[in-house]
Amino acid sequence: MAAKKGLTYFYDSIVLTLVVVLAAGVLGYYEHGHFTGAFDWIFLVLVLALLEISISFENAVVNATVLKKMNALWRCRFVTWGMWVAVFGMRFVIPLLIVCSAARIGPVKALQLALFKSGEYARLLQASHHQILAFGGSFLLMASLRYFFDVNKEVHWIKIIEGPLAKLGKLESIEIGVVLLFLYLLSNGVPPNESAALLRSGLAGILVFIVTESLGSLLQGSGGQSGRTSLGLFLYLEILDASFSFDGVVGAFAISSQLPLIALGLGIGAMFVRSLTLLMVDRGTLETFVFLEHGGFWAVAALAALMFLQIMVPVPEVVTSLVGVTIIGLSLWSSLRNSI
């Protein structure tokens, strides 16, 4: 697929931003009855969009490593179908289902809370924060360890660490054992009444990763059919995006308790991340900057570690953002030095 020029990769994202800003202004005016309320909603939407972009930069890099294996049709679907899944699925429906599970209420009641009692909705979602972190942290740690525990991995960024990790890939399912060890240690660090739920959520993260990986292999089959393979990768990408977004969704409630506002703001960020991913794939960024892929997976491992850490102590969103961006920046700098 021929690479586009300039800012054309971001045209759809810019158009979506304008539409969402207009919608936020209308909703804000409807909610408060004056233009000050409209401008407040517009401001909050833009803040939430920046939050999503800042904490998801490593997501774009890791997505690119998967997207480059997909055919042109499924790359397009990643932006179109995937965008609907990202905004309405991962950033609207999934939080509702979490509240349903935590409060043992039906989806209609959860939606009513989200729309009319946003404070109570935010409280219920926050009450499930540890389980969300355990699921997302386990899935992301599995993804990063699967990358590093690979005996066929020949290019290493941090050789003193990545070399031995690649050799450990000879051990069957070592990444599962490592994640289980982390979950066991975490379960002993929380109150006894929370440990079982934390373990269940962490095990669910491991199981979902294994299922999506296996489904991808099954769809690929012995013939390696491009469309079927791309479908498996698409499903994997959407779950990967969900794991990245969980922490951002919960953190967004520190900015606003209005679920429609959060979905709109994070949706803008998600679209820009997808545009950046396509740019990286079409321009061959990962091939040009050889250590960028490594940096992406190190950033994923760091995010997983921070999600686990948040179960024990609060971690500001700015720390999460800076850690990921710093690791990506260092890998980019190393790639530039390597090419000189």
Image: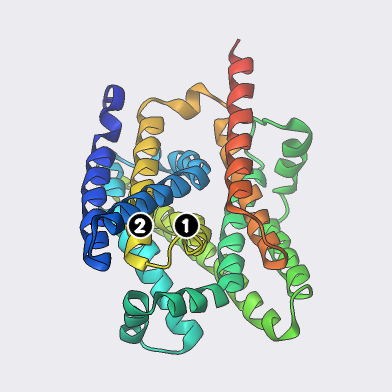
Q: Which mark is residue 334?
A: none
In the depicted structure, whether residue 263 falls above or below residue 109: above
Asked if residue 167 lies left or right of residue 263, the reply is: right
Asked if residue 170 lies left or right of residue 130, the reply is: right
The image shows residue 8 at horizontal and vertical percentages of 25, 29
In the depicted structure, whether residue 289 falls above or below residue 189: above
Which is nearer the eye, 226 or 33? 33
Give the residue type at disc 1.
Ser
Which is nearer the eye, 279 or 247? 247
Give the residue type at disc 2.
Ala
* Circles 2 and 1: CB atoms closer than 8 Å: yes
The image shows residue 21 at horizontal and vertical percentages of 26, 49
Q: Residues within 10 Å of mark 2 (few under 14, many from 20)?
A: many
Say which quadrant the C terminus sits in. Answer: top right
Secondary structure category for the residue under label 2: helix
Which is nearer the eye, 123 or 214? 123
Secondary structure category for the residue under label 1: helix
Q: Residue drawn at (40%, 56%), measured in percent from left and top? A: 238
Which is nearer the eye, 165 or 305? 305
Q: Which mark is residue 86?
A: 2
Q: Residue drawn at (71%, 57%), measured in percent from left and top? A: 174
Say which quadrant the N terminus sits in. Answer: top left
Q: Earlier in the sequence, mark 2 or mark 1?
A: 2
Residue for badge 1: 245
The image shows residue 186 at horizontal and vertical percentages of 74, 69
Q: Decide if residue 143 is in sight here.
A: yes
Colour mode of the rendering: rainbow
